Image (cartoon, rainbow, N blue to C red):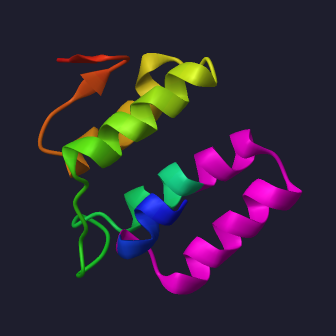
Amino acid sequence: MEEFREVLDPQVADALGACVRSCTPDLAFRLLLRALVERSASRSPEGVSLSVGQYASLDRLGVALNYGEFVVNDVDHLASVTWRGDRQL
């Protein structure tokens, strides 16, 4: 979660950290993706972008959680390139 603290509101980042510890990693990951969509330029005047490394981390987590390719792709517009697994698309 620390990797994304700079692009999230501090309260949101803290809540997601608490979710990782007290809920399930799966729920925390889905909430992180949703929070990133909400912070996107299309929904927020302070629109955020993700580094290639941040997007690759999200993609690896999605693969590890056995998510289909379209779950993490919901935030691919925030990154400068698109990744799937260990490969750039």
Q: Is residue 67 visible?
A: no
Count of labels shown?
Answer: 0
Quarter of the figure with the C terminus:
top left
Q: Is residue 73 above or below residue 35?
A: above
User: In this rendering, would 80 be left or right of 21?
Assistant: left
Q: Is residue 74 magenta?
A: no
> Viewer-proximal residue, 47 or 60?
60
Q: Residue at x 58, y 76 (%)?
A: 12
Q: Is residue 13 visible?
A: yes
Q: Is residue 79 above or below residue 65?
A: below
Q: Whole-percent x and y of residue 47?
A: 24, 71
User: In this rendering, would 40 be left or right of 1?
Assistant: left
Quadrant in the picture for residue 44: bottom left
**Overall secondary structure of the magenta section:** helix
Q: Residue at x 55, y 59 (%)?
A: 1
Q: Residue at x 45, y 28 (%)?
A: 60
Q: Is residue 14 magenta?
A: yes
Q: Whole-percent x and y of residue 53?
A: 27, 43
Q: Whole-percent x and y of residue 9?
A: 47, 81
User: In this rendering, would 72 be left or right of 64?
Assistant: left
Q: Whole-percent x and y of residue 15?
A: 69, 73
> Viewer-proximal residue, 5 or 70?
5
Q: Residue at x 68, y 66 (%)?
A: 17
Residue found farthest to the right: 22
Q: Which residues are magenta?
A: 7-31
Quadrant in the picture for residue 74: top left
